[in-house]
Image (tube, rainbow, N blue to C red):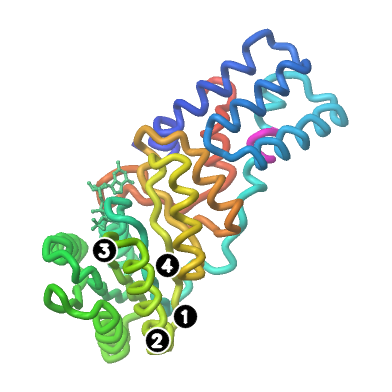
Amino acid sequence: MGLMDSLKKGLKRSREAINEIFYMGGEVDEDFWEDLEDTLVMGDMGAEVALSVTDDLREQAARENLVRADQLKDALARRLAAEFPAAARDPFEDLPSCVVFVGINGAGKTTTVGKLAGRARDAGTSCLIGGADTFRAAAIEQLEVWGRRAGVDVITRERGADPASVCYDVVEEAERRGSELVLVDTAGRLHTSADLMRELAKLVGVTRKRSAAPVSVVLVIDATTGQNGLAQAREFNDALDLDGLIVTKLDGTARGGIALAISSQLGLPIYRIGVGESLDDLQIFDALDFCRALVGEEGM
Ligand SMILES: Nc1nc2c(ncn2[C@@H]2O[C@H](COP(=O)(O)OP(=O)(O)OP(=O)(O)O)[C@@H](O)[C@H]2O)c(=O)[nH]1
């Protein structure tokens, strides 16, 4: 399945809801604008975004005399796409680079690190993985499986070791080998969220201090978490000053709008999206493609 197909499948629910308003009577009247705003809110985009997008579209429709569903849908996709901040730098393409992945357990960090390592190997980029989730032995094993699959070495320490020391080790080893890309997987669960944030803040601090290559802190977020995802992202951003996002599981039952809410409200670019569990299911994020899949074009 291609990117657009996986994405369209995942965003089916949002699209169906939007299609419903467009076909309700075919007339662009007061009810239409109210329904559109409600549908955007229900799609997890957040009330603020929904309101400003609807207002802008309404003005544009009046100005440009857009009355047909296909014209309005295209304008809606473009207006939604404008909500996503663009990335100033791609931490997986602009090398050398060191990326620390954070996020709650199950968000897809390890899988994403594996996919990116596989991509790096295919592109001929020398890559090294740091396994800083020393909290769970199974996490290290899982990462090593992905490392083997991708043909990329994993630097880690024994269970219970200081995760910040793993970062120190992997950055040092990367410098010794001349590796261009370092990908660090971290723990998603500790006793409390405050413990986790404290540990991650220390780990990020050590990595930033030790690495000569630019360090990016990327939040991996599961698109199926809905509104709770926004609160999660805020907590990580407050503690760690994130650089950007990777949104996973957009092939699943996601409503998708949460990606837009987080990215636009926190001003964080989306670097990649996960659309499945295998090595190939990670894609570069294209805001307009995403919004077209969200809104649906004629015949979709
Ligand atoms: N459908 C789908 N599943 C995904 C995607 N990304 C990850 N997963 C699945 O989500 C589950 C959790 O992924 P992990 O990579 O283990 O998550 P994690 O954040 O590393 O979790 P911890 O190690 O517990 O912190 C696995 O079953 C993955 O296969 C995606 O883009 N789509």
Residue 272 can be seen, yes or no: no
* Crowd class of label 4 (few under 14; some 14 to 19; many from 20; radius 10 Å): many
In this rendering, position of residue 138 left or right of residue 175: left
Neighbor class of circle 2 (other Cα within 10 Å; few <14, some 14-19, many 20+) is some
Alpha carbons under labels 1 and 2: distance apart? 7 Å
Query: Which residue bears the numbered disc 2?
Result: 211
Q: Amino acid at mark 4?
A: Phe
Q: Nearer the viewer, mark 2 or mark 3?
A: 3
Q: Are marks 2 and 4 in contact (CB under 8 Å)?
A: no
Callout 2: helix, strand or loop?
loop
Residue hosting label 1: 214
Q: Which mark is residue 190?
A: 3
Percent x, y of residue 27: 74, 12
Q: Amino acid at mark 1?
A: Pro
Structural distance between the alpha carbons of marks 2 and 4: 16 Å
Q: CA gap, disc 3 to disc 4?
A: 28 Å
Instruction: Say which quarter of the image contains residue 126.
Output: bottom left
Secondary element at image label 4? loop
Q: Which residue is at a point 12% across and 77% down the rendered structure image?
A: 158
Q: Marks 1 and 2: CB-CB under 8 Å?
A: yes
